[in-house]
Image (cartoon, rainbow, N blue to C red):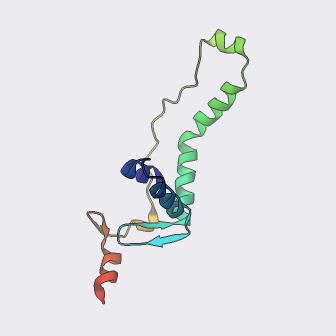
Amino acid sequence: MVISLVNTHGLKDVNELEKNLKIYQTDKLETSTMIWTNQMRKHLELEIWNNQKDFIVELYEFVNKNKSELVKEQKSVPNCDKRLKNCVTYTEINQEIRCGQYYLRIWAEKYRD
């Protein structure tokens, strides 16, 4: 979500970035265009860790090698050549119906009255 927000809005507007960070850190938010919970945040962080832990381990080992080992291996930077294992999905929104950018259940509740 954070990556999507940064890609959508860019880093030009610091206020927008701070607003998006507050959304990311919030416990629960339901609007017609966004559903976000702390469980979804924890799930995203776990998925990022699961997808990058091999690289993090390799990076840690790399920074702890001495110069002669690096010269011997002819390695100047650690490699991160693995693709994401799978797309991050959220069970919390599996049953939601989305039309364009709107979650219809929430949109309908907003305009029902």
Q: Nearer the viewer, residue 39 or 76?
A: 76
Q: Which image quadrant for residue 55?
A: top right
- How far across and down, in percent of the image, does residue 36 sit? 47, 66
Q: Please identify the quadrant where the C terminus is shown.
A: bottom left
Q: Is residue 99 above or below residue 89?
A: below
Residue at the farthest bottom position: 113
Q: Nearer the viewer, residue 13 or 77?
A: 13
Name the residue at 34% across, 82% down. Answer: 109
Q: Nearer the viewer, residue 44 or 28?
A: 28
Q: Is residue 16 above or below residue 33?
A: above
- How far across and down, in percent of the image, does residue 92 sit? 45, 67
Name the residue at 63% across, 30% down. Answer: 59
- How far across and down, in percent of the image, does residue 58 sit? 63, 30
Q: Please identify the quadrant where the N terminus is shown.
A: bottom left
Name the residue at 57% across, 59% down. Answer: 42
- How far across and down, in percent of the image, does residue 30 sit? 43, 73
Q: Across the whole image, how many numbered discs are drawn on residues?
A: 0
